[in-house]
Amino acid sequence: MKPLDDAQAAVLGELRKLGTETVELADSVGRVLAEDIEAREAIPPFPNSAMDGYAVQGLDVTEPGAMLKVTGEAAAGSQPGLQVRPGTAVKIMTGAPMPAGADTIVKVEDTERVDDVVKILPAVPEGTSVRSAGSDIPKGSVVFSKGTRLHPTHIGVLATVGAARPPVARRPRVALFSTGDELAAPSTATLRPGQIRDSNRIMLKTMLAEVSTVLDEGIVSDDPVALRGAFGRAVAGSDVIVTSGGVSMGDHDYVRKILGDMGDVDFWKVAIKPAKPFAFGRLSGVPFFGLPGNPVSAFVAFEQLVRPALLAMQGATRVLRPRIRAIAGEKIESDKHRLEFVRVSLELQDRGRLVATPSGGQGSHMLAALAAADGFAVVPVGEDLVKAGQGVDIELFRNPETRSLALG
């Protein structure tokens, strides 16, 4: 069995980077930048007000009760041109350009106005509530580096600097199919004896959609001829092939055998639990990931090996899920011979303690317990028990909402 670190390194070492393309900004969420993005101008491009109020000279408001003559009004979007001289003020709105001569903003709540005279109630320090040019992003700075995977907040920044069609890596085209005579479509109303509904393909399809373009090839039976045909079709139109099932030691586990006949198998066992049976290789130069048939095993294998690989193909600089530290809420038993991923739910308890508790049964077929989990407790090789109250590493695979909003 290959240790997980070695398996991940072997996979990443075999992958080729994809080409680049430009996309509309609204379509770039989740994509990986192919080039550095530089700011062509300062953001904000001009000094402006952070408050609704009055633009003044700081020397005029060093003491409470200053009386200033209002000589104009500046709104957001207005052209610069107004000027503040000693003893005067300009009414100003949030985001409006600072008038010439002004260096301080007095918020409207700290004033009293009668006709064209405003009284400044408190003393106001010079520079208050002024946004200087470039205070957010200096001109010429690198806003985001090549390899950044774009989040909605990145999109807002790209819009601000005018990167309306950012250069991104092309998404890999992934051919996906499930294998097994026992599989029926999720829409099957009544199962025949021995049948189960195909949960893996729809689960993997949604996971793949986050980081790739999915080519859904459906369910393929446990038949060598059918499998060879499916592999041939998949190679023709994809950058990567992902399957579930058929990679273990059973008499009808043909996937690994056919992969060996048609291509190359680099390895097919990983020292993790669940997801030990896992085939990685190439078919006509196309990387192939053969995931286990048990749904929890398929999920773990995808998270640890497929997802990082697909991100790396796009040049992402960060490809692994975040890990945090938590306290075991109860004992966690594990197989000391393999790195184990125990499905856990998380709870923030008193005094800020993050507590991890197994979310249910840990069998590789127990998908409901996986759905109840927030992450994996990662138990290293050599340890067979994490005691209640002991610290443990948690790898997050989702960030659920945890607080309710009182309504009505």
Image: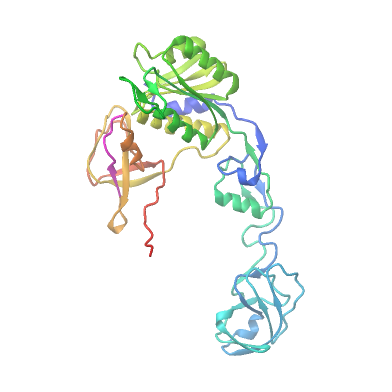
Q: Main secondary structure of the magenta part?
A: loop
**Above or below for 131 versus 82:** above
- Residue 275, image x, y percentages: 36, 26
Taking the spot 37% from the left edge, 62% from the top edge, the residue there is 406
Quadrant assignment for the N terminus: top left
- Residue 193, image x, y percentages: 30, 20
**Taking the image as drawn, is residue 201 in sight?**
yes
Taking the spot 41% from the left edge, 14% from the top edge, the residue there is 222
- Picture quarter containing residue 255? top left
- Residue 324, image x, y percentages: 38, 46
Residue 357 in magenta stretch: yes
Q: How is the image coloured?
A: rainbow
**Above or below for 304 versus 24:** above
Count of numbered marks: 0
The residue sitting at the front extreme is 189
Nearest to the observer: residue 256 or residue 136: 256
**Above or below for 109 versus 348:** below
- Picture quarter containing residue 63? bottom right
- Residue 265, image x, y percentages: 47, 16
Q: Which residues are drawn in magenta?
A: 355-364
Taking the spot 41% from the left edge, 29% from the top edge, the residue there is 186
